[in-house]
Amino acid sequence: MKTVRHFKSLLDINRKEFLRIIERAITLKNDSKNNVTHNIFNNKTMAMIFKKNSTRTRVAFETAMSKMGGHAIFLSSDTTQMSRGENISDTGKVLSGMVDIILIRTHNHNEVVELAKHSSVPVINGLTEKFHPCQLLADMQTFYEEKGNFEDKKIAWVGDGCNMCNSYINAAKLLNFQLKISTPSGCEPDKKTLSLASDNVELCDLPGKAVEDCDLVTTDVWTSMGDESDVEKRKQLFRGFQINQHLFDKAKHDAIFMHCLPAYRGEEVESDVIDGKRSRVWQQAQNRLFTSQALIEFLLNESE
C-alpha cells in the first residue's frame, strides 16, 4: 500500500529528516551555482491552491518545479469551483487523481488537515494562520549555513506570537535549540504548540531579555494577513517590540538577523538592522527556492 507523506507542519518530519532536507537544499544550491541541472521532477505536476496572497512561496515552488523538470499549476480560489462552494475534501479527491503533489496556502489550518486527509498525494502547507513550516526550512538552512549547527544555540523571537513563531517553536523542539520569545500580552503563541516544546522555549516579558546573548534575532510583521482592520491598534500594542540597533546590540556580537518578509521598515524592524551587515534576509529569501526543491523531492520519494 502506498504511503503518503504530508507536510502540514514541521512535526510531520523528524529531526533526521529535517536535517536531510536542509543538507539536500544546500547541495541543490551549490549545484545551481555550478550550473548543474536536474530533471528529477520530469512528468511531475504540482497543483498550487492559493487563498492568500504570496510572493516568495508562489515563486519558490513554481520555480522549484520548473528548474527540476516538472510543472506547477496556479489555482486561485477566486477562479476555481472553490469560489462556488466546492468543499476542500472534494477538491483534494479530484486534484490528487490528476497531479503528483499539492500545495495549499490558506487562512484556516483545518483546511490543510482536511485536504491531506482526502488526498492520495502529498500535501504541503504553504502557510496558514497557525503554521508556516516551509519558511522555517529556509530559515534553518540559512542558520545552518551561518552557524554550522543548532545544538547549544539561542534564537530570539520578538513580536507577534503568529504562525511563524509557532513554527519556530516546532523547530526548536526538533533541532534542540533554545528559543526565547517576547510578545505583547495577549499575543502569545499557540498554547498547545508551546506545551509540546516546553524544554526548549522560554517566554520573556521584555524584548531585551529575549535578545540577550542570542545567535539569531528574528521577527515578523505586526499585522498579519487578515488582521489589517486592526493595524493602528496593533502599532500601539507592539510599540517597544521593534528590532532596532539598540535592541539588536544586546545579542551576541556575531548574531544575525532574519525576517521572513515582507518587512515594514520603521515598524517591526529599523532599516539599519534589516539592511545592515549582519542581516541575512536576502540569503534567507533565496533559500526558499532550494528548500522547496528539497522538500518536494523528499515528499515524492517518501510517498512512492
Image (spheres, helix red, strand yellow):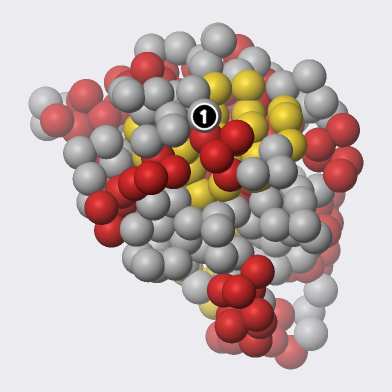
The image quadrant of residue 181 is top right
Label 1 Cα neighbours within 10 Å, binned few <14 / some 14-19 / many ≥20: some
Q: Could you tell me which residue is drawn at 50 percent across and 73 percent down?
A: 53
Label 1: element kind? loop
Q: Position of residue 250 (x, y in %)?
A: 44, 33
Q: Could you tell me which residue is drawn at 51 percent across and 62 percent down?
A: 221
Is residue 207 placed above or below 242 in the rendered structure? above
Q: Position of residue 229 (x, y in %)?
A: 65, 86
Is residue 235 placed above or below 198 in the rendered structure? below
Q: Position of residue 66 (x, y in %)?
A: 31, 50
Is residue 89 placed above or below 278 in the rendered structure? below
Dot 1 amino acid type: Glu
Q: Which residue is mark 1?
A: 212
Describe residue 262's horizontal placement relative to residue 170 as left or right: left
Front-lying residue, 188 or 283: 188
Q: Position of residue 281 (x, y in %)?
A: 33, 46
